[in-house]
């Protein structure tokens, strides 16, 4: 049994009482074994002195595209459908096994370095096994799946156009290989891209497979008004109504964005227990809109946070997403509309609920998985600390540069800014080589 003792910390637990404790936290193997003042656990393998440090639950990001990290800076200043057609789909079509591996590693390195310990990831059509290999090696906790796109369209590159049966079979094969890997650290999520790119046959098969395997479904919906118009023209229904019509709207569904919702769609989300991933940075950069997050939360819809992909956000930083999620609502709904604690809840235990792991992660409690980050808030931009809510300091003042240590499943994957599972120099070098290769295969501007 390995034992790690974190001493003299400010511990932001996010337990039901949202207690903030000054003391120690003991990790035994992959679990939190004790939290309290002046713990005396006997011999331990390692001690981290966390004086003047703050320990938080690892962030849970519920919408990420690791396959797109290589495209950072290649999709700037476009709206969603042009962004997809002109840049993202051609680049995804150019991926090979190696480029996808390094795209995933590049994104994971950034996520770990900024305190994210769990992601819900959507890959591209091909080579998804390479992304799972990166996830496995890095130590990050992930729900991931190959993207599914079986609807024929002249807008979609031929390399991304699938046959329905093949898309489903490859997804099932990946699920059976990776779901539950490393004692459940890696899980599979069926990932139809969005209604526009999927036939009804595929979506109903996904519905049945999700129920049969009891796994999540991760898709996009109601991100852009043009997208909604296309769905209405093709189905006669709005996005969420259509998903409910075919039986996909349930507690296993994670919907990215859900910005443009009418009253009926909000009712469906609430009554069916659908989880919404709010991605404010992406929504602003693609000019998609501002989600109705305060109203959704007020009516008890499950809402968590995600950064989306690097080419529609340019970073995968939960500190950025928390700050934006709070600030963009205040001019319309007032200064208390999205307070710091609400936003921090979304970034931690709210994300854990969305992925079905609230009994395992999302808060620092005895018996839960040891997924956490240690922040150094002893700095000019986070002081004074006297009589300031620590969660306010994290949401409104802290940055990703303040993350010193990240622990996932009890393993220290970064300490003092040094990565243990991702070789930074290799990943950065190979990422540049990979994007150069991909660009040589495309005709994007």
Image (cartoon, helix red, strand yellow):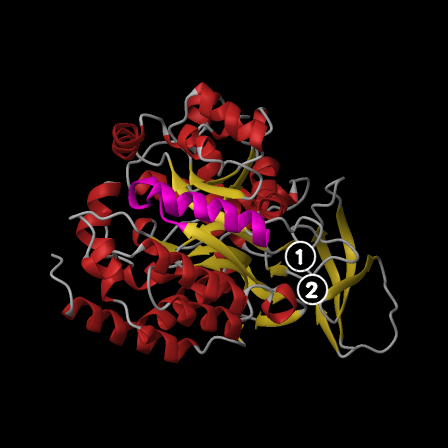
Residue, disc 2: 50
Determine if the magenta segment contains residue 213.
yes
In this rendering, the answer to whether 151 lies above or below 110 is: above
| Cα distance in 3D space between marks 1 and 2 | 8 Å
Image location of residue 140, percent across then percent down:
54, 65
Mark 2 crowdedness (10 Å alpha carbons): few <14, some 14-19, many ≥20: many
In this rendering, the answer to whether 403 lies above or below 235 is: below
Q: Nearer the viewer, residue 284 or 265?
A: 265
Q: Residue at x 32, y 77 (%)?
A: 430
Q: Quadrant of the C terminus?
A: bottom left
Q: Which residues are magenta?
A: 192-214
Determine if the magenta segment contains residue 128.
no
Q: How many marks?
A: 2
- 232 displayed left or right of 349: left
Q: Nearer the viewer, residue 250 or 299?
A: 250
Instruction: Look at the numbered disc 1 and give the secondary structure of its residue.
Output: strand
Q: Residue furthest top?
A: 263
Residue, disc 1: 55
Decide: marks 1, 2 in contact (CB < 8 A)?
yes
Examine the rendering and report whether any part of residue 110 can be seen.
yes
Q: Residue at x 58, y 24 (%)?
A: 299
- 365 displayed left or right of 122: right
Most frequent secondary structure within the magenta stretch: helix
Image location of residue 426, percent across then percent down:
38, 80
Q: Nearer the viewer, mark 1 or mark 2?
A: 1
In this rendering, the answer to whether 164 lies above or below 97 is: above
């Amino acid at each position: 049994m390995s034992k790690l003792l974190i001493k003299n910390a400010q511990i932001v637990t996010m337990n039901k009482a949202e207690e903030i404790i000054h003391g120690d936290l003991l990790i035994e193997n992959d679990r939190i074994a004790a939290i309290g003042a002046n713990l005396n656990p006997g011999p331990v393998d390692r001690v981290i002195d966390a004086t003047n440090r703050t320990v938080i639950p690892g962030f849970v990001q519920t919408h990420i595209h690791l396959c797109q990290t290589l495209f950072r800076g290649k999709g700037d200043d476009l709206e969603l459908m042009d962004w997809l057609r002109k840049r993202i789909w051609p680049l995804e079509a150019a991926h090979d096994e190696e480029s996808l591996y390094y795209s995933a590693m590049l994104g994971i390195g950034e996520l770990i370095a900024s305190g994210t310990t769990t992601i819900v990831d959507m890959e591209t059509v091909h080579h998804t096994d390479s992304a799972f290999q990166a996830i496995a090696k890095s130590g990050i906790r992930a729900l991931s799946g190959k993207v599914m796109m079986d609807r024929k369209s002249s807008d979609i590159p031929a390399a991304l156009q699938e046959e329905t049966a093949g898309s489903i079979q490859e997804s099932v094969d990946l699920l059976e290989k990776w779901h539950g890997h490393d004692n459940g650290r890696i899980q599979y999520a069926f990932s139809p891209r969005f209604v526009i790119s999927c036939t009804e046959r595929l979506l109903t098969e996904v519905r049945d497979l999700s129920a049969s395997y009891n796994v999540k479904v991760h898709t996009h919906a109601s991100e852009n008004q043009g997208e909604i118009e296309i769905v209405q023209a093709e189905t006669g229904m709005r996005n969420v109504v259509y998903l409910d019509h075919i039986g996909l709207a349930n507690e296993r569904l994670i919907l990215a964005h859900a910005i443009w919702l009418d009253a009926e769609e909000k009712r469906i989300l609430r009554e069916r227990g659908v989880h919404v991933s709010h991605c404010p940075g992406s929504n602003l950069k693609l000019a998609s809109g501002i989600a109705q997050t305060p109203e959704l939360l007020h009516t008890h819809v499950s809402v968590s946070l995600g950064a989306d992909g690097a080419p529609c956000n340019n970073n995968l930083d939960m500190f950025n997403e928390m700050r934006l999620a709070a600030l963009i609502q205040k001019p319309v709904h007032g200064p208390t509309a999205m307070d710091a604690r609400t936003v921090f809840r979304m970034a931690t235990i709210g994300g854990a609920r969305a992925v079905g792991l609230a009994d395992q992660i999302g808060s620092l409690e005895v018996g839960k998985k040891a997924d956490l980050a240690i922040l150094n808030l002893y700095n000019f931009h986070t002081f004074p600390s006297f009589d300031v809510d620590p969660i306010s300091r994290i949401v409104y003042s802290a940055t990703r540069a303040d993350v010193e240590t990240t622990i996932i499943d009890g393993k220290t994957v970064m300490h003092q800014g040094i990565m243990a599972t991702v070789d930074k120099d290799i990943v950065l070098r190979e990422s540049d080589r990979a994007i150069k290769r991909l660009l040589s295969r495309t005709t994007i501007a």
